[in-house]
Amino acid sequence: MLEVIAKSDLEKRLLALCEIHIGPLGFRVIDVDCSTGGRSLVRAFVEFLAPEGPRSPTLDECASVSRVLGGVLEAEELVSGSYNLEVSSPGLDRRLRTLEDFESSVGSEVRLRLVSPVSGLGKEPAGTVKSVKGSPGGEGDPSVVLQCQSREWEIPLARVRRANRVWKS
């Protein structure tokens, strides 16, 4: 999986440790959020990689992943002081983190949270993914072409802090 969105050093480290420790158990971490401060909060969104295809984890599976990640957080001393750990399924507003996530979302509506605002678009645009350009290590930095406000905007994925599919009923 090729990382393309902006992540803090702590989040990058946690993602790498998740790949090592929960990947062999049959899970993929969709995304993580880490907020530090008074009482830190660590959130992990996971899916179970079943033979018939990825699926949302059960409550018992989330609890198992939580126990493993809790042990990893303690052993690695990633978060200083007290913290809360939340492990859940990606839900209907699934997160997008890797180039593959964005490519599989072409034609879907998404909401982005950018590292910094784009003139005329703001910091939290929403629209339809028209295409994905470039590749990490290849020619050109990866970007997403987003249809919103009656025009197409090419946004470098390195400027994206968080991305979610938008669920419509």
Image (cartoon, helix red, strand yellow):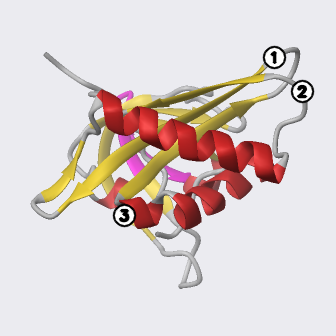
Residue 152 drawn in magenta: yes
Is residue 169 found left or right of 165 in the rendered image?
A: left
Please name the residue that numbered disc 1 is placed on.
39
Question: What percent of the width, then of the height, locates residue 16?
Answer: 63, 62
Is label 2 in contact with label 3 (beta carbons under 8 Å)? no
Q: Secondary structure at mark 2?
A: loop
Is residue 135 found left or right of 132 in the rendered image?
A: right
Amino acid type, callout 1: Arg
Examine the rendered structure and indicate whether residue 62 appears above or below residue 2: above
Q: Which circle marks residue 69 in the picture?
A: none
Is label 2 in contact with label 1 (beta carbons under 8 Å)? yes
Quadrant containing the C terminus in the rendered view: top left
In this view, the residue in front, 28 or 77, is 77
The answer to which quarter of the image holds residue 132 is bottom left
Q: Is residue 33 visible?
A: yes
Residue at the image point whose x is 26% and y is 28% from the top = 92
Residue at the image point whose x is 80% and y is 53% from the top = 76
Q: CA distance from mark 2 to mark 3?
A: 35 Å
**Would you say the magenta stretch is mainly helix, strand or loop?**
strand
The answer to which quarter of the image holds residue 23 is bottom left
Question: What percent of the width, then of the height, locates residue 73?
Answer: 73, 44
Q: CA distance from mark 3 to mark 1?
A: 33 Å
- Tell me where the magenta segment starts and ends, as one range: 145-156
Examine the rendered structure and indicate whether residue 23 appears above or below residue 130: below
Please name the residue that numbered disc 3 is placed on.
100
Amino acid type, callout 2: Gly
Is label 3 in contact with label 1 (beta carbons under 8 Å)? no
Q: Is residue 90 visible?
A: no
Amino acid type, callout 3: Glu
Question: What percent of the width, then of the height, locates residue 106?
Answer: 25, 52
Q: Earlier in the sequence, mark 2 or mark 1?
A: 1
Please name the residue that numbered disc 2 is placed on.
81
